[in-house]
Structure formats: C-alpha cells, structure tokens
Amino acid sequence: MNIVPFHVDVDGLRLRGSHYLPVGDGPFPTAILFHGFGSSRVEFSSMFVALARRLADRGIASIAYDRAGHGESDGTFFDTTVSRDVTHAQAVIDAVAALPSADADNLHLVGISLGAVVASVVAAEATRPVRSASMWSTAAVFADEISSGMLQGRSLDALDTDGYFDFLGTRLGPAMRDDATSFDVYGRASGFSGAVNLMHGTADFVPVSYAERYADVYGERAQILIVEGADHGWTRVPDRDLLYSRTVDFIADQAGGSR
C-alpha cells in the first residue's frame, strides 16, 4: 500500500487527508472515510489506517480526511456543525472523483459515530453516485440529545454562561447546538438508493434503536449487524476484527468483486 497526501480547499479552508492506494495501476474503487466527533482521520487507535490496509489488499483505495476544525485541517472546533461537515464532504467527493487513480463511478462511504451521520446524508445528497455506505456506531442520537439541552450526558448550559462547551478540553461553540435542533437525521439520509451496511454494539452509549431506525428507513437496501457487548469504539479485538472483515467484504462485493 502507498500513502500520499490529499487535500481539498472549501470555504477558504484547507481540509487535509491521506490517500491510501493499492499496489498496481488504477483507477481503483475508492472509499471515503469519515471520522467521529472530536477525532481525526486515523481514528481511535488508528482503526481507519487498519481498515485502509485491508481495503488496499482487496484492490480498493481509500481516502481519510480531517473535517474542518479537526486534526490537521484548517478551521476551529468551535465552529463545528454537522451541516457544515456535510457541505464540505460534497466538495471532498468531487475532488476524489476527479483523481486519476479513483474510479468516479465506484465510490463508497464509511463513517463512525457522528461521521456515520455525515456519511449517510452525503450518500443521499451527493451530486455523483455513491455505491455503498458503511455506518459504524452511528451517533444519530446527537440531534435528540442536543435538542434536550445535553451532550454526552452533560448539560449544554455553559454555552450560554461561558460562551462555549468544554468537550474534552476543546471549546465547542453554540453553532453545533443551533444546527442540531433543526437537523433532520433520518429524513436527509432516506434518499440514498445504494446498499447500506449498519454495525452497532449492544454496549454502545448510543442505543441500538438508532441503528435499527436507519434499517427501517433503508429497508431492503440495508443489512444490519448488532454485536453483543461491542462498545462505541469497538475496543475489543474480536469485535474490531469482525468490524473490519464484514466492512471490507461488503465494500468489495458492492465494488464488483475487487480482488
């Protein structure tokens, strides 16, 4: 596998990422990876890098990038909103499709946590066709939780008293709250006509019902696997091995049996 830099400029910001390429000549089926809230493109314990290596072994390229205000990309976490992330992701897809190494008719999305929410909406609203979406630990609960005045079990009152919410030592501004209260999670995702792979654990702090509702929205287009005891970050080796193997097999199948 070869790794080369990737970037796209949007709204005056540079989003930076990594392009993981299989050995050989392209163009390759290509997966775009969406990290979780407050994380970065390699994801917790480099799980996106591990996924990219497995995809490359099957002849599938992948691109992981830091969303605005995350990792090495421009912007501030303070200004984060899901709607902005969706808009930026559309520019990323256009940039990926223009790469000579990418098969623009064979694009796939993978997201974890809030990144899975972003991926679900991007898949439905993309200006070019997306073949599949893989959604891990989808944090669709964010809209309900924030609308109730909470975020991951903590009150958002500090947004009004301090001007920011302290998220793991990083300032999050009120734009996230304002956006979430009107964000139609399932409605905006429902227009995707491709195949969907949903994976969720019973020990996830996001209730399984949120993944099951996606399965209802997608109907026969979706396959869902609920893994007993798996947590939000898939932090047990057997759970993560299953996550990788099922996702790679699913994408390879949707890509047309890549080696």
Image: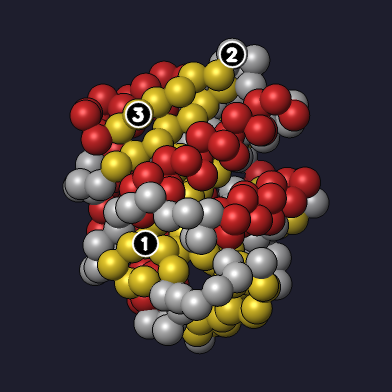
Q: Residues within 10 Å of mark 2 (few under 14, many from 20)?
A: few
Residue that mark 3 sits on:
223
Q: If the image is split into quadrants, where does the N terminus sit?
A: bottom right
Q: Position of residue 149 (x, y in %)?
A: 52, 34
Q: Which residue is mark 1?
A: 107
Disc 1 packing (10 Å; few <14; some 14–19; many ≥20): many
Q: Earlier in the sequence, mark 1 or mark 3?
A: 1
Which residue is pictured at 38% across the width and 50% down the height?
257
1 or 2: tag closer to the N-terminus? 1
Between 12 and 39, the one lying in front of the other is: 39
> Which disc, if any, is residue 5?
none
* Mark found first going from the N terminus, 2 or 3: 3
Determine the residue positioned at 42% across, 32% down.
Answer: 198
Three-letter code, disc 2: Glu
Viewer-closest of 157 and 146? 146
Q: Secondary structure at mark 2?
A: loop
Please, is residue 144 above or below residue 95 in the view?
A: above
Direction from residue 84 to residue 45 in the image, left or right:
right
Alpha carbon of mark 2 to alpha carbon of mark 3: how far?
A: 16 Å
Instruction: Give the colour scheme shown.
Output: secondary structure
Q: Tell me the distance, in whole angstroms, between the alpha carbons under discs 1 and 3.
A: 19 Å
Spatial CA span between label 1 and label 2? 30 Å
**In this rendering, does residue 141 appear at all?**
no
Percent position (x, y) of residue 115? 51, 49
SS state under label 1: strand
Q: Position of residue 250 (x, y in %)?
A: 42, 41
Which residue shows up at 58% across the image and 67% down it?
22
Residue 205 position (above or below residue 197): above
> Which residue matches tag 2?
228
Q: Secondary structure at mark 3?
A: strand
Three-letter amino acid code at the position of disc 1: Leu
Q: Is residue 2 visible?
A: yes
